[in-house]
Image (tube, rainbow, N blue to C red):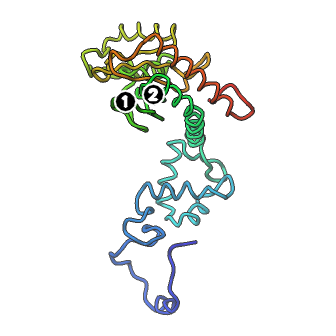
Amino acid sequence: MSHTMIRQGDAGRVASQPARSPAPGPPLAHDLGPDGGPNAPQRTVMGRIATIMDAFQGGPRTISLGELSVRTSLPKSTLHRLTEQLCSAGWIERDPSGYRIGLRLFELGSLAVEGTRLHDAAAPHLRALAAKTGMAVQLAILDGAEIVYLDRVTSSRFKVPSRRGGRKPAYCTGLGKALFAFDNDALDAVFSAPMPARTASTITDAGQMWAEVRRIRESGVAYDKGEAHDGLICVASPVRDAGRALAAVSVTGPKGQVQLGSVSEEVRRTSAAIWNATCSTTPQGRGSVA
């Protein structure tokens, strides 16, 4: 339904007035959004983009520019500019009949589904690992040259400087190393970016980091020995089969309290258990979530 309406009784007055250029005044209704306020969502670029994407819900697979204009109440000039930008980003695609949802948006949506499935499958194993080791346990994925924390189970005995949804550089974390060691694209991103020292123990030399990668590939375990934060040790293992790592799980604790041998074995077992649990939740029991 259009947000631009003429109140009853106004039509005659409008018709009797001569045509003239509109005087400066408040934004038009289609610029204000449904609530009519100056800060309404449709007033912003992101709000207008969200309106365009919402127009594809419950309709035909392909929508013409004219139909999009009707569904969004946006001017065609504005709509054309935004749809061109969305096409460039891969969020929507053009075809002879109009526009349709793009593959890039499908890929991003798939990542969200996979992330939820991974989180749900991993949660009981993370709690069990934390109870067994008495340390903080974390689950992360890789985004370029950074890790993103999906979940964490903390210990009341010490504080771990991380949070759900938080990010850290991959090169100085056990989780990051466990992930990029099995991802060639991520390796390129990490080695192309600066690796500044965060502590006296941070690995900043490319040759030394390559040696770390080779060791991680052989053992399946990565270490952060005070490289991100002084006094904290991290033991991490990738959640993977024979291919690219989907995520990584880690145990973190104070230096002197983490027994590397026993903790490494527990982390490896947990990463394998999370992989098996994640695969069991995929459609038709597929052995991959990619």
> Which quadrant would residue 69 be assigned to in this image?
bottom right
Q: Which residue is painted at 48% across and 69% down in the image?
A: 34
Q: In the image, is 65 to the left or to the right of 190? A: right
Q: Which residue is mark 1?
A: 168
> At label 2, which amino acid type do we have?
Val
Tell me: residue 287, above or below residue 116. above
Q: Amino acid at mark 1?
A: Lys
**The C terminus: image quadrant:** top right
Measuring from the top left, give residue 164's x and y in whole percent.
Answer: 43, 38
The part of the image, by quadrant, that contains residue 37 is bottom left
Residue at left 44%, top 62%?
A: 41
The disc label shown at residue 69, or none: none
Image location (x, y in percent) of residue 19: 43, 84
The picture places residue 135, in percent across and down from the top left corner, at 42, 25
Q: Is residue 40 left or right of residue 12?
A: left
The residue nearer to you, when weighing 27 against 153, is: 153
Tell me how many marks there are.
2
* Label 1 crowd (10 A; few <14 / some 14-19 / many >=20): some
Residue toward you, 29 or 229 = 229
Q: Do tag 1 and tag 2 residues touch (Cβ < 8 Å)?
A: no
Q: Residue at x 47, y 69 (%)?
A: 30
Secondary structure under badge 1? strand
Q: Label 2: which residue?
A: 137
Find numbered disc 2 in the image and state the secondary structure of the residue it sits on: strand
The percent position of residue 253, horizontal first and vertical second, equals 37, 22
Front position among marks 1 and 2: 2
Of labels 1 and 2, earlier in sequence is: 2
Q: Is residue 52 above or below residue 201?
A: below
Mark 1 and mark 2: Cα distance apart in space: 16 Å
Which of 144/224 is in front?
Answer: 224
